[in-house]
Amino acid sequence: MKIATYNVWIEDKGIGGRFEQLVHEIVCVDADIIALQEVTAKFYHDIRKQETGYQYCIFNKYIDEDEGLAILSKYPVDDCTFLHEYPEYANSKAQNILFRYGTSRFSFTNVHIPWDSVREKEKQIVAIDKYIQDQKEQADYFVLLGDFNSDINSSVHRFLTGEQTINNEESNPNWLDIMGNYYTLHGLPLQPTLDCINNPRWKGKNTIYSPANTDRIYILDNWEPMEFVNAEIFGTAISPINNLSASDHYGVVVDVDFSK
């Protein structure tokens, strides 16, 4: 199964004119299921009209914002929960769907953790993890992915991977960072997804920030058989027309064999 995540950088509110680039990247990566962040209602409406190959699509808009989360899937969706509507889950910016692939059941959670408050990041990631952990009887495999607005040295990542607690809460079982693990196992350097050096979005503007791995795909380490076949970033191409990459973030795509 090819799984992807991509922050599309609010195409019609940020630096526009990138819609065709974004569609091209989404089509070319050809994931079985892809999570999108910074999706406006207009972008979702427009991309649904494109021949992307995704028959099943979900969009949830945040309260009082013209922005939200979307999932494009080649598999039928059995159920969807928008955690942003639930105070008991910290009104987190996260959407969860349940679907089946073969004989296996999957839980798939798309997130966009806030960038401007460590306290809010920690509050939401604990709530999101609790929601998923409470689902243990509803799926065989659990995927958590999106823009975490935090690097691999952050409390968010360390909490998910079982390296630390947050407010005396722990993630148990913990999560595996698929791209991070794949690159380590194959002796490869981890590539940034928020590239403040090479992405033209930051050219001439960034003088202090280092590249970071903020967009990630995790799978719950629940001892079910699987193999990480491949992991890579996408969306790095620069258009000769506008001299921009499709987004200010690069996407992440992984290939996981669940038949082992």
Image (cartoon, helix red, strand yellow):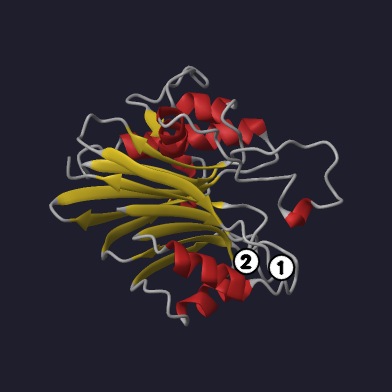
Tell me the SS state at disc 1. Answer: loop
Tell me the SS state at disc 2. Answer: loop
Crowd rating for badge 1 (residues with CA inside 10 Å; few <14, some 14–19, many 20+): few
Crowd rating for badge 2 (residues with CA inside 10 Å; few <14, some 14–19, many 20+): some
Residue 68 percent coordinates (x, y): 55, 60
Q: Can residue 86 be seen in this view?
A: no
Residue type of the residue flagged with mark 2: Asp
172, above or below 102, in the image = above
The residue to which callout 1 is attached is 13
Q: Do the residues labelled 1 and 2 touch (CB within 8 Å)?
A: yes
Which is in the foreground here, disc 1 or disc 2?
Answer: 1
Which quadrant would residue 2 be assigned to in this image? bottom left
Quadrant of the frame with the C terminus: top left
Q: Is residue 9 visible?
A: yes
Q: Which residue is drawn at 48% across and 53% down?
A: 5
6, above or below 27, in the image = above
Tell me: 30 left or right of 117: left
Which quadrant would residue 200 be assigned to in this image? bottom right
